[in-house]
Image (cartoon, coloured by chain):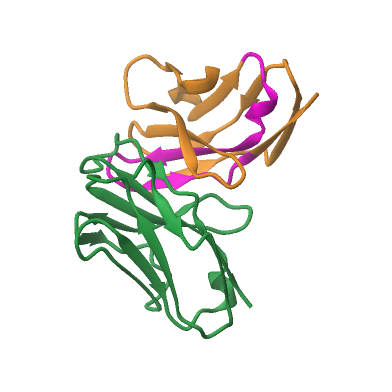
Chain colours: A orange, B green
Amino acid sequence: AQSVTQPDIHITVSEGASLELRCNYSYGATPYLFWYVQSPGQGLQLLLKYFSGDTLVQGIKGFEAEFKRSQSSFNLRKPSVHWSDAAEYFCAVGAGDYKLSFGAGTTVTVRA
Amino acid sequence: GAGVSQSPRYKVAKRGQDVALRCDPISGHVSLFWYQQALGQGPEFLTYFQNEAQLDKSGLPSDRFFAERPEGSVSTLKIQRTQQEDSAVYLCASSLGWAAGNEKLFFGSGTQLSVL
Protein backbone atom coordinates (compact mmCIF):
# COMPACT_ATOMS: atom_id res chain seq x y z
CA ALA A 1 0.00 0.00 0.00
CA GLN A 2 1.08 3.54 -0.63
CA SER A 3 1.89 6.07 2.11
CA VAL A 4 2.95 9.69 2.46
CA THR A 5 5.21 11.47 4.93
CA GLN A 6 5.22 15.22 5.43
CA PRO A 7 8.19 15.83 7.74
CA ASP A 8 7.29 19.38 8.73
CA ILE A 9 4.27 19.82 10.97
CA HIS A 10 4.45 23.62 11.02
CA ILE A 11 6.36 26.19 8.97
CA THR A 12 6.47 29.95 9.53
CA VAL A 13 7.52 32.14 6.64
CA SER A 14 7.66 35.88 6.10
CA GLU A 15 5.42 37.45 3.50
CA GLY A 16 7.32 37.72 0.24
CA ALA A 17 9.77 34.98 1.14
CA SER A 18 9.96 31.64 -0.65
CA LEU A 19 8.24 28.52 0.62
CA GLU A 20 9.06 24.85 0.22
CA LEU A 21 6.97 22.05 1.70
CA ARG A 22 8.39 18.55 1.75
CA CYS A 23 6.59 15.37 0.79
CA ASN A 24 7.99 11.85 0.62
CA TYR A 25 5.96 8.92 -0.60
CA SER A 26 6.22 5.18 -0.54
CA TYR A 27 4.88 3.26 -3.52
CA GLY A 28 6.35 0.58 -5.73
CA ALA A 29 5.30 1.89 -9.12
CA THR A 30 4.91 5.36 -10.57
CA PRO A 31 2.50 7.12 -8.25
CA TYR A 32 -0.20 9.67 -8.87
CA LEU A 33 0.77 12.65 -6.69
CA PHE A 34 -1.30 15.57 -5.49
CA TRP A 35 -1.06 18.66 -3.33
CA TYR A 36 -4.21 19.98 -1.66
CA VAL A 37 -4.68 23.12 0.44
CA GLN A 38 -7.18 23.50 3.27
CA SER A 39 -8.04 26.94 4.60
CA PRO A 40 -9.91 27.23 7.91
CA GLY A 41 -13.56 26.28 7.47
CA GLN A 42 -13.02 25.33 3.86
CA GLY A 43 -12.82 22.07 1.99
CA LEU A 44 -9.62 20.78 0.49
CA GLN A 45 -8.75 22.42 -2.81
CA LEU A 46 -6.50 20.83 -5.41
CA LEU A 47 -3.33 22.86 -6.07
CA LEU A 48 -1.66 20.57 -8.58
CA LYS A 49 -1.17 16.95 -9.61
CA TYR A 50 1.40 14.76 -11.29
CA PHE A 51 0.72 11.59 -13.29
CA SER A 52 3.46 11.40 -15.89
CA GLY A 53 5.59 13.49 -18.21
CA ASP A 54 7.36 16.67 -17.16
CA THR A 55 8.47 16.25 -13.58
CA LEU A 56 7.98 19.95 -12.81
CA VAL A 57 4.29 20.73 -12.59
CA GLN A 58 2.63 24.08 -12.30
CA GLY A 59 -0.47 24.61 -10.25
CA ILE A 60 -2.87 27.30 -9.18
CA LYS A 61 -2.01 30.30 -6.99
CA GLY A 62 1.60 30.34 -8.22
CA PHE A 63 2.57 26.97 -6.75
CA GLU A 64 4.75 24.38 -8.42
CA ALA A 65 6.01 20.95 -7.43
CA GLU A 66 8.79 18.70 -8.64
CA PHE A 67 8.62 14.92 -8.80
CA LYS A 68 11.95 13.26 -8.02
CA ARG A 69 11.72 9.52 -8.41
CA SER A 70 15.23 8.89 -7.04
CA GLN A 71 14.27 10.63 -3.79
CA SER A 72 10.64 9.50 -3.69
CA SER A 73 9.75 13.13 -3.20
CA PHE A 74 7.19 15.61 -4.48
CA ASN A 75 8.04 18.92 -2.83
CA LEU A 76 5.82 21.98 -3.20
CA ARG A 77 7.30 25.43 -3.78
CA LYS A 78 6.22 29.01 -4.14
CA PRO A 79 8.71 31.80 -4.90
CA SER A 80 6.96 34.57 -2.99
CA VAL A 81 4.38 33.89 -0.30
CA HIS A 82 1.30 36.03 0.26
CA TRP A 83 -0.56 36.34 3.55
CA SER A 84 -3.48 34.48 1.96
CA ASP A 85 -1.27 31.39 1.59
CA ALA A 86 -1.57 30.72 5.33
CA ALA A 87 -3.34 27.36 5.43
CA GLU A 88 -2.77 23.65 5.88
CA TYR A 89 -1.21 21.77 2.99
CA PHE A 90 -1.66 18.07 2.30
CA CYS A 91 0.33 15.85 0.00
CA ALA A 92 -1.48 12.77 -1.30
CA VAL A 93 -0.53 9.71 -3.29
CA GLY A 94 -2.70 7.44 -5.40
CA ALA A 95 -2.04 4.12 -7.05
CA GLY A 96 -4.08 4.93 -10.13
CA ASP A 97 -7.39 3.87 -8.65
CA TYR A 98 -9.89 5.93 -6.73
CA LYS A 99 -8.24 5.77 -3.29
CA LEU A 100 -5.88 8.49 -2.04
CA SER A 101 -3.51 8.31 0.91
CA PHE A 102 -2.88 11.67 2.53
CA GLY A 103 -0.01 12.90 4.65
CA ALA A 104 -0.63 14.42 8.06
CA GLY A 105 -0.32 17.93 6.65
CA THR A 106 1.90 20.97 7.10
CA THR A 107 0.50 24.14 8.62
CA VAL A 108 1.90 27.32 7.08
CA THR A 109 1.89 30.57 9.02
CA VAL A 110 2.73 33.78 7.18
CA ARG A 111 4.12 36.67 9.21
CA ALA A 112 4.02 40.26 8.03
CA GLY B 1 -25.10 23.37 -6.71
CA ALA B 2 -21.85 25.25 -7.04
CA GLY B 3 -19.90 22.94 -4.78
CA VAL B 4 -20.11 19.95 -2.47
CA SER B 5 -22.38 20.74 0.44
CA GLN B 6 -22.28 18.97 3.78
CA SER B 7 -24.63 19.24 6.72
CA PRO B 8 -24.65 19.78 9.56
CA ARG B 9 -21.46 21.80 9.82
CA TYR B 10 -21.06 20.81 13.47
CA LYS B 11 -22.61 17.94 15.39
CA VAL B 12 -22.31 17.23 19.07
CA ALA B 13 -23.49 13.81 20.17
CA LYS B 14 -23.62 12.04 23.48
CA ARG B 15 -21.83 8.73 23.55
CA GLY B 16 -24.19 6.03 22.39
CA GLN B 17 -26.31 8.27 20.18
CA ASP B 18 -26.81 7.64 16.47
CA VAL B 19 -25.87 10.38 14.02
CA ALA B 20 -26.46 10.98 10.32
CA LEU B 21 -24.23 13.16 8.20
CA ARG B 22 -25.40 14.40 4.82
CA CYS B 23 -23.49 15.12 1.63
CA ASP B 24 -24.83 16.84 -1.48
CA PRO B 25 -22.28 16.34 -4.25
CA ILE B 26 -21.93 18.50 -7.31
CA SER B 27 -24.82 17.75 -9.65
CA GLY B 28 -23.95 15.10 -12.20
CA HIS B 29 -20.88 13.82 -10.41
CA VAL B 30 -20.64 10.07 -10.69
CA SER B 31 -18.17 9.35 -7.92
CA LEU B 32 -18.59 10.13 -4.24
CA PHE B 33 -16.17 9.56 -1.37
CA TRP B 34 -16.22 9.83 2.40
CA TYR B 35 -13.04 10.56 4.31
CA GLN B 36 -12.42 10.83 8.05
CA GLN B 37 -9.98 13.45 9.33
CA ALA B 38 -8.90 13.11 12.94
CA LEU B 39 -7.40 16.10 14.72
CA GLY B 40 -3.89 16.79 13.45
CA GLN B 41 -4.08 14.10 10.79
CA GLY B 42 -4.72 13.91 7.08
CA PRO B 43 -7.96 12.57 5.67
CA GLU B 44 -8.37 8.80 5.68
CA PHE B 45 -10.50 6.97 3.14
CA LEU B 46 -13.76 5.49 4.38
CA THR B 47 -15.88 4.52 1.40
CA TYR B 48 -16.49 5.07 -2.32
CA PHE B 49 -19.64 5.15 -4.46
CA GLN B 50 -20.10 5.08 -8.21
CA ASN B 51 -23.60 6.41 -8.69
CA GLU B 52 -25.68 4.39 -6.20
CA ALA B 53 -23.30 1.45 -5.98
CA GLN B 54 -20.98 1.30 -2.99
CA LEU B 55 -17.89 -0.20 -4.55
CA ASP B 56 -15.54 -0.01 -1.60
CA LYS B 57 -16.28 0.25 2.09
CA SER B 58 -12.96 -1.09 3.28
CA GLY B 59 -12.12 2.06 5.23
CA LEU B 60 -15.17 2.05 7.48
CA PRO B 61 -13.77 1.58 11.02
CA SER B 62 -16.47 -0.75 12.31
CA ASP B 63 -19.91 -2.13 11.58
CA ARG B 64 -21.33 0.89 13.42
CA PHE B 65 -20.55 2.93 10.30
CA PHE B 66 -22.91 2.74 7.37
CA ALA B 67 -23.10 4.82 4.19
CA GLU B 68 -25.68 4.99 1.44
CA ARG B 69 -26.39 6.84 -1.77
CA PRO B 70 -29.75 5.40 -2.83
CA GLU B 71 -30.45 7.56 -5.87
CA GLY B 72 -26.91 8.20 -6.96
CA SER B 73 -26.80 11.77 -5.73
CA VAL B 74 -27.14 12.67 -2.04
CA SER B 75 -25.25 10.44 0.36
CA THR B 76 -25.66 9.85 4.07
CA LEU B 77 -23.02 8.54 6.45
CA LYS B 78 -24.60 7.04 9.54
CA ILE B 79 -22.77 6.22 12.73
CA GLN B 80 -24.59 4.11 15.28
CA ARG B 81 -23.88 4.09 19.02
CA THR B 82 -21.22 6.80 18.70
CA GLN B 83 -18.00 6.48 20.68
CA GLN B 84 -15.49 9.15 21.65
CA GLU B 85 -13.01 7.82 19.11
CA ASP B 86 -15.50 8.70 16.37
CA SER B 87 -14.84 12.40 17.02
CA ALA B 88 -13.37 13.77 13.81
CA VAL B 89 -14.17 15.85 10.74
CA TYR B 90 -16.00 13.83 8.12
CA LEU B 91 -15.27 15.00 4.60
CA CYS B 92 -17.26 14.24 1.50
CA ALA B 93 -15.79 14.57 -1.98
CA SER B 94 -17.14 14.04 -5.46
CA SER B 95 -15.71 13.76 -8.94
CA LEU B 96 -17.22 13.92 -12.38
CA GLY B 97 -16.10 10.61 -13.79
CA TRP B 98 -15.30 7.10 -12.74
CA ALA B 99 -12.40 8.10 -10.46
CA ALA B 100 -9.68 6.31 -12.37
CA GLY B 101 -7.00 7.94 -10.27
CA ASN B 102 -6.55 11.13 -12.22
CA GLU B 103 -9.88 12.69 -11.44
CA LYS B 104 -10.01 15.98 -9.63
CA LEU B 105 -11.81 15.63 -6.32
CA PHE B 106 -14.05 18.41 -5.06
CA PHE B 107 -14.31 18.42 -1.28
CA GLY B 108 -17.00 19.76 0.97
CA SER B 109 -16.19 21.76 4.10
CA GLY B 110 -16.87 18.75 6.28
CA THR B 111 -18.93 17.92 9.32
CA GLN B 112 -17.11 18.22 12.63
CA LEU B 113 -18.42 15.53 14.95
CA SER B 114 -17.74 15.75 18.66
CA VAL B 115 -18.79 12.82 20.83
CA LEU B 116 -19.02 13.62 24.53
**Quarter of the picture holding the N terminus of chain B:** top left
Vertical arrangement, residue B97 with respect to residue A22, above or below: below
Q: Look at the image and tell me whether residue A44 can be seen.
A: yes
Write down the quadrant of residue A31 in the picture: top left
Residue A63 visible here = no
Closer to us: A99 or B105: B105
- The answer to whether A7 appears left or right of B104 in the picture is right
Q: Position of residue B113 (x, y in %)?
A: 55, 67
User: Residue A80: horizontal and vertical position, in percent?
Assistant: 66, 15
The magenta segment is A79-106
List the single residue furthest toward the right: A112
User: Please, which residue is most extreme toward the front here?
Assistant: B1
Which residue is drawn at the image coordinates 31% and 64% (left, top)?
Answer: B57
Q: Quadrant of residue A19?
A: top right
Residue A96 magenta-drawn? Answer: yes
- The answer to which quarter of the image holds residue B97 is top left
A46 above or below B112? Answer: above
Q: Position of residue A75 (x, y in %)?
A: 55, 26
Residue A39 drawn at (x, y percent): 59, 40
Q: Is residue B37 above or below residue A29?
A: below
- The answer to whether B71 appears left or right of B9 in the picture is left
Give the mark count: 0
Q: Is residue B82 left or right of residue A8?
A: left
At x 64%, y 78%, the residue is B116
The verdict on residue A80 being magenta is yes
